[in-house]
Amino acid sequence: MHIILTGAAGIVGSHTLKYLLARGHSVDAIDIVPIAPTVLDAIPKEASERLRTHVADLVDLSKFEAIVKAAGHVDGVIHNGGIPNPLNNDPRVVYNTNVTSNYNVLQTCAKYGIFRIAQASSVNAYGMSFTPEGHKFWDELPMNEQSPARPEDPYATSKIACEEQANAICRFYNGMRIASLRYHACWPDYETATQCARYQSLFGWVSLESCASAALAAITSEGWDKHEVFNLVAPEICWEGGKDPESRFNGEMLDSLALLEANWQGRYSGVDKSWWASNPRRGFWDCTKAERLLQWKHEG
């Protein structure tokens, strides 16, 4: 297949690029900055012949449209481009960049008949890591794709807006299919993830390999249509008893519900404790929809 990949210089994007090329696909890779030489040098010569790279700002509609027109036949688009968090950026820039670039990609794909798209969303769409202290509250646990969301920061609200744009595009254009992939904190492996596990994010993570496999499955899988949102989180919590200095009971290996009670007392409701009956360290996100429709399984 021929795939357009945006955000190809980022952590998730560069891994997805290597994942696609390793499986024989050809890629037009786009980012606002050049892809690192270390990434490009690691790509075998045969695979690099199936790669074209572009430096372009997706907010500039003409740049993305020119790349699409020159690409010829395109089977799908994986849209990872955007600002990945609200830190150290003007909130207006974060929101406007993410929402505008997303709409530019979706509308341009529809215009040129590219009807299969995977777009990077985030579990922060629920309102999580960047929500101000004192505002965080979980209405139900575990969380599935229909669970209530409380987005407040510019990154979270931009992700909700991008998902709504996908709904609108799929209603307007017959045959359009979009997957919004709600990734958690994306790390190469569990060991790396434990160094960054935080109670604010409910001790979750997802491997880079699993992000890439979900994106490809969102384009290639069958049996669903229009716009669907998918939680993509490792099945167990990521916490080894002491990595997070802000966590209560540091140094103790607690299970999921004990960690919830220790860190979130009075700030959650509607806990279905049966979810943890077979595995006390099971995570707080229900990813069975991705497992069912995308045949996705977390790796790493």
Image (cartoon, rainbow, N blue to C red):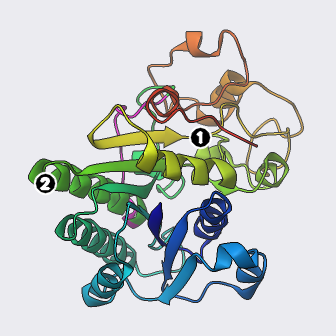
| Label 1 sits on residue | 233
Queried whether the magenta region covers residue 146, the answer comes back as yes
User: From this viewpoint, is residue 135 visible?
Assistant: no
Q: Quadrant of residue 96?
A: bottom left
**In percent of the image, x 32 and y 75: which residue is there?**
101
**In percent of the image, x 37 and y 58: which residue is there?**
159
Q: Amino acid at mark 2?
A: Tyr
Queried whether the magenta region covers residue 249, the answer comes back as no
Residue furthest to the right in view is 251
For the C terminus, the quadrant is top right
User: From this viewpoint, is residue 96 visible?
Assistant: yes
Q: Residues within 10 Å of mark 1 (few under 14, many from 20)?
A: many
Q: CA distance from mark 1 to mark 2?
A: 30 Å
Q: Quadrant of residue 298?
A: top right
Relative image position of residue 104 (x, y in whole percent): 26, 74
Residue furthest to the left in view is 172
Relative image position of residue 251 (x, y in whole percent): 89, 38
User: In the image, which residues are magenta?
Assistant: 143-154
Q: Residues within 10 Å of mark 2 (few under 14, many from 20)?
A: some
Answer left or right for 83 relative to 255: left
Relative image position of residue 230 (x, y in whole percent): 43, 40
- Helix, strand or loop for disc 1: loop
Q: Amino acid at mark 1?
A: Val
> Which is more toward the observer, 17 or 196?
17
> How would you classify the magenta stretch by its main secondary structure?
loop
| Label 2 sits on residue | 173
> In the picture shown, does residue 101 fall above or below 292?
below
> In the picture shown, does residue 132 fall above or below 149?
below
- Helix, strand or loop for disc 2: loop
